[in-house]
Each structure stands twice: as structure tokens, then as C-alpha cells.
Image: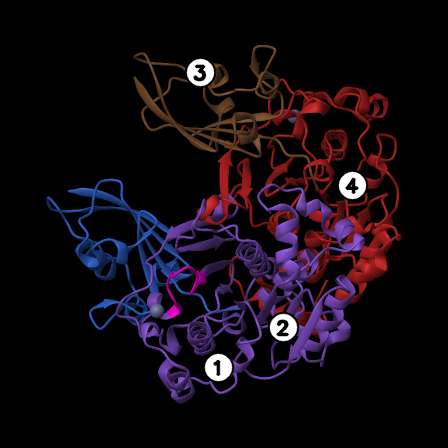
Chain colours: A blue, B brown, C red, D purple
Amino acid sequence: MVKVKVEFLGGLDQTFNGIKNLKLEIDGEEPKLIELINKLSNEYISNEKDFEMFIQEGTIRPGILVLINDTDWELEDKEDYILDDGDLISFTSTLHGG
Amino acid sequence: MVKVKVEFLGGLDQTFNGIKNLKLEIDGEEPKLIELINKLSNEYISNEKDFEMFIQEGTIRPGILVLINDTDWELEDKEDYILDDGDLISFTSTLHGG
Amino acid sequence: MELTNEEYSRYGRQMQVPEFGSLNSQINLKNSKILVIGCGGLGSSALLYLASSGIGKIGLLDHDKVEISNLHRQIIHDSNSIGLYKTESAFKRLKLINPNLTIIKHSIMLDNLNSIEIFNNYDLILDCTDNPITKYLISDTCIVTNKPLVSASSVKTDGQLIILNYQNGPCYRCIHPKPTKPENIATCSDDGVIGPCVGLVGVLMSIESIKILTNYYNLNNNPYKPIMLMYSGYNDNNGQSIKSFKMRGKQSDCICNKLTKEIIKSTNYLQFCGSINYNILN
Amino acid sequence: MELTNEEYSRYGRQMQVPEFGSLNSQINLKNSKILVIGCGGLGSSALLYLASSGIGKIGLLDHDKVEISNLHRQIIHDSNSIGLYKTESAFKRLKLINPNLTIIKHSIMLDNLNSIEIFNNYDLILDCTDNPITKYLISDTCIVTNKPLVSASSVKTDGQLIILNYQNGPCYRCIHPKPTKPENIATCSDDGVIGPCVGLVGVLMSIESIKILTNYYNLNNNPYKPIMLMYSGYNDNNGQSIKSFKMRGKQSDCICNKLTKEIIKSTNYLQFCGSINYNILN
Ligand SMILES: [Zn+2]
Ligand SMILES: [Zn+2]
């Protein structure tokens, strides 16, 4: 079991009932980031139409950036990143206002 | 031995030869913050007149705030705080420009 | 009090933001009276945004006149302002920005004999000054007149902000019981400042002021806790940062617990802070 | 090129700051030509500080006119600006702020047929627009004209900033290979924005622009690395924050590696981003 912190930025908290910060436990010896994403989308989105704001075509929707300990997940293993105790996983919407 | 991080903010890096961030090892089982302060003033200030910018009347000079893991040292034990591995100790000058 | 149709159009976009608090908050702003002390680098951006936001009445306090060396950072003024009182120059710009706003000019130097009477006319004080003498005086006066205080400073590329005398939090003396010696102080005139860096700190002040005036910090669901915001504008290749430090509360042994009007009026603030003669409120 | 006495007085305080880089940096600013696309909430504060800082030439691009609902956040304009082109209103204010500045007005809508020719006249581009169609077009045009880009956005209480196409770093498409669907996008008109929050992000843009133009990021002692600055203005009782995220570099499979002028001119950006018709450059 691994304990991680999750934060939703750029207004993405609205998709998760206004929750901005979360501490979560993920089962298993070496759980991957995809398991956290599945847990978030299955257990923390109460509104069915909000699901599309987080997941599209089986992955994080375009316009959401994922950061592992303040680093773009593209520099890590994306969905296959192996979670470690104390990791901070940030999800942020890309903003478009000016 | 305890490993800590030190940062100098608000222009205080100038007193320490322009160093903004530092990783330091302090000897002993349960070293106190005062030992870090002594080490900094004895080993990291090369200019004698800079000493007064850090220490006055035997303690941190008025106008410098000390933060232990982003918390005012007044909420901890000040000089007697027992350093822990990974602690971040910040020293910041109070600014006066407007 | 209600809003006019013009005000609904003007402030609609901010009333839409859930954190702002809708119509009630806009009316709170309209009913608010704030005093901005120092119409320089911090005051410029703080004033432009506070005036635009729909605050009812703003007092401008500064005894200085606009100089050309101010203009790289003091964006409320312009080349035609040179030689005018900063209060006069700011007044002109703010009236154009928002004609709904009532503006009071205090083109005088703040001192321990006039501060109490002035502060009594306002709900919130912004300290945009640049020297410790005035910072102690402003904090002390906020204590005896019971006004919350948004206090900030900026030099070179960095800045600091703290909310004082608010919801039983600390005063300036609680944080700084002993003044910094004059020879240990960096100022904008001696050490310079990047215009938008001090400007950014002024913007931070305007946002914290709006939060206070709209009761964003409230005992029910978001109580204020003492923090200091630390801004760094030139973080090598990490860009810029704002960190939030958790600060001490009101100190039981601080002078603020027994401060009176009489004590303020008989205190020699210049002597208390040391003998170098600052150019106050620059 | 040298500075006049007036310029020494005007910019002295920023030339004193070691991180700025003294006279050389001031001359670099004087020689610089920047294009600011969008004279709204981000553009207002970015422009006021960049004009004050001594940049030689600024291009203003916006096809919109000032409306009263803009004024709570677009502090470069004022009540007399309502109905004027934003470029015209900004021009007037900036000329008063700094008469040394050369200003070019582009009161047109940016599109894939005019963008390349316009960008060719400038050294640095600031994307202060509010919709993905324009953001992709601006990034693509920066690729083929080889211009660094400071790109930012802000909605409600938050904002983001990223430097693109700089020192072999990423482009907008490297970060966002697929556009966000129109129905998943929040905008200032729909969701509102706190005036000083978007203003603060504009100030961040001005500071990063000054760093680029003065070679603060340089291969010798402070190489640029791709980061995104994330600003949050309403952090419950933790005040405000700016975090720095380490971002991916230029992606080898990104379209930017083979973009040409011809491809830009034949791309249907509206179709690429989806079918909702945005009010571009608001
Ligand atoms: Zn006190
Ligand atoms: Zn690319």
C-alpha cells in the first residue's frame, strides 16, 4: 500500500466536488499511476457528465496536465509511473482566459 | 549527523557570498538550530563586516525572520529547535522598499 | 444599498467567480473605505486594481511629488505627472478608471500626531511605504483605531506581504519587536527595484484587501491564520515563486496589548528606529 | 546605441539591480521590438510595465473595442476608452507613460494569412489571448518566424505562464498535442475572473519578457529550462501561491519539427480546435 497526495488545480477541483487536496492510499506493492487515475475517476466523480472532464478515449483528457512531484509526467513514465510513498500528483486544467 | 537544507531570502544571500541555497551536515545526535546558526556565521561569512548583518548581540539580528519548514521559529523552539533530517531552514531579511 | 445597472455591467465578471462571493461581496466593496499610504511602486498597482474593483471610497496619503526616476515602476503616474503631488496624479488617473469612486487626498506626511484622526475615517489600511519608522507608526495606529492592515514591502526582485491586526492576529511589533538598524536596511533608492516586481507585490496587496473586504477569511469556513507571503521574482531558472510562511500570532508580551492614543502621540518614532533620516513614504 | 540623460534618470533604479544587468540590459531593452497580442486583462498589466521599463518598440494587436465589462480588470483602459479600439486606447495610455516608446497598432484579427508577416517585425511575442485557436496559431507562427513566445492564461482566480519556442524548448503543440474540446474550456466571459488575479499573471509575463530580452536566461550561467508557472490567487487561508513545474522539452514527434509557412497558411485552425465560435482575442 502506498500513500500519495493529490491536488487539483486550474479549476479541476470542480470536477471533483470542489475538493482541491486529497490524501489517498493505493493498494498493492508497486501501484502505477494509472491505478490512482482509475480510483479517482471511479470513486471521486459523483456527476456522470463530469467524467468527460477528466477521462476521454481511455486516458486523461486533452488539456489536462499531470505532474508527478512538480514534474511533467512526460518526463516520467506517464500512466506507468510507479507510485512512491509521499508522492504529490497534481492534475491541472489548461486555462484559456486572457 | 543531520542533513538540512538552508535558504537565504530577501537579499540575505549577499551576506553569504551570493549563496541562495545550501545543503549542510551538522554533527551530533540531536543538534540544535543554534549549532547550524553558529556554523553558518563561522564558516560561510567571508567578510567580517557582513557578520553584523546576520548576528547581533549574540543572536540573529533584528529584521531577520527564521523559518523552520516554512513555519516561523517562534512557533517552534527557536535556537533550541532540534534539527531533523531533511529540514528546510529559511532566513529572510525584512524588506522595507515600497 | 444596491448596485446600479452600470455597476452590474462593470463588475459582472468578478461577481461570477464563486470565491468572490457574488452580489453581497460587491455591495461590501461599495460600502468600503480604504486608506492607501504611499502612492509609489506598491501603491500604483494596488490602487489601479482596487479602484477598478468597485471599492466605494479610497484615501490617498503621500507627501511626495512624482519624479522621473519613479516612472519605471509607478504606473499610476505618467510623464505629465512629473512635479505633481503623487496624490493629485493618482487622483486624476483613478477618477478616469472609475468615476463611481470617491477619492480623498491626504497630501501630507503621516506622523504620530495626525495618524489616528486620519485612520478613523477608514475600514482597512494598506501600508505601501518604504521605511520602518512609518511601518511601526502605521501598525500602532491600526491597533488603537482597530483597523486591519495589509502591509508589504519590495526591494530589488523580491517582496513580502503580511496581514496585521486582523482577527486577533499579530501586529508589526509582534513580528518585529526590535527595529532593524538603519545601516542594515536596503531601500529602493539605494538598491534599486525591478518595476514589475514591486508592482506584483502591490497586486498581491489588492487581492488580499479584496478578500478581507468581502469576508473571504471568516470564522465560519475559512478563518484567517497569520501567514507571510514571500515573493521572489528572479529565481535563476525556476522562474518566479510565492511561498506562504506560517507566522506567530499576537504575542502576549507585545506593546500592542497596552497601546493607547496617548502613547502613540508621545512616542518619538524616529528615535525608536534609529537616527538615519529616511525619505519617508518614497 | 546609447542612453540619453532622461533615460538614465528614468531607468536608473532598475539598472541598479544586479540581476537586471546594468547598462547593457537597458540598451538591450531599448533595441527590442515586442508584439503583445491581446490588450485585455493580461495585456493591460504586461503592457504598462513593459512600456515603463524602456522597451524600444511595442506592437499592439487586438481587433476588439473596449466595453464597460472589461474595466474591472483591463487597467490600461479607462471609462473614456469605451467604444474605442483597445489598441487605440492602450496607445494613448502608453504614450503618456513613456514618450520614448514607439508603438505600432494592429487593430485587426490575427489569422493564419497575416500572422507571419506581422511577427517578422518583432523579436519577442506575448500571447495574452484567451482561446486555443489563437494560441495554436501564435505558437505555430513563432516556430516558422523563429521568435520566442511568452504565453499565459488566467480564469477566475488562477493563472498559468509558459515560455515557448525558446532555446530549443517546447512549442504549444509539444505540450498540448491535442486541443481541448470547446465544451471543456472555461473562459473569462463564462466563468469570470478576479481583476487583479489576471493582472498578476500579466505582470509575471512582463518580468519573464524582461528576463528574455536582457539575456538573464543564458547558456553560460543560467540556461533556460522548460517550466510552467502556476498561480493560485485564492488558496483558502494560505494566501496566494506561485509554483514552478518542470516541463517536457521539445518533442521529437511534434508537428513543430516540420512546420512551414505554407502549412500554416493552409491550416484551418478553427476546424482543428473544434466548432464553437469563440470571440477571438477578447
Ligand atoms: Zn503586537
Ligand atoms: Zn512542438
Local secondary structure at mark 2: strand
Q: Amino acid at mark 2?
A: Gly
Q: Which residue is mark 2?
A: D59
Mark count: 4
How far apart are the two marked residues, 1 and 2, measured between alpha carbons? 23 Å
Q: Which mark is residue B39?
A: 3
**Quadrant where ligand 2 appears:** bottom left
Q: Of circles 1 and 4, which is in front?
A: 4
Answer above or below: position of C225 versus B83: below
Q: Which residues are magenta?
A: D163-172
Q: Which mark is residue C163?
A: none
Say if disc 1 is inside 8 Å of ligand 2: no
**Residue D138 shown in magenta:** no
Q: Are marks 4 and 3 in contact (CB under 8 Å)?
A: no
Q: Do discs 3 and 2 belong to a common subunit?
A: no
Q: Position of residue C2 (x, y in %)?
A: 71, 66
Q: Position of residue B43 (x, y in %)?
A: 46, 17
Q: Of circles 4 and 3, which is in front?
A: 3
The quarter of the picture where the N terminus of chain C appears is bottom right
Q: Amino acid at mark 3?
A: Lys
Q: Nearer the viewer, residue D28 or B68?
A: D28
The quarter of the picture where the C terminus of chain C appears is top right
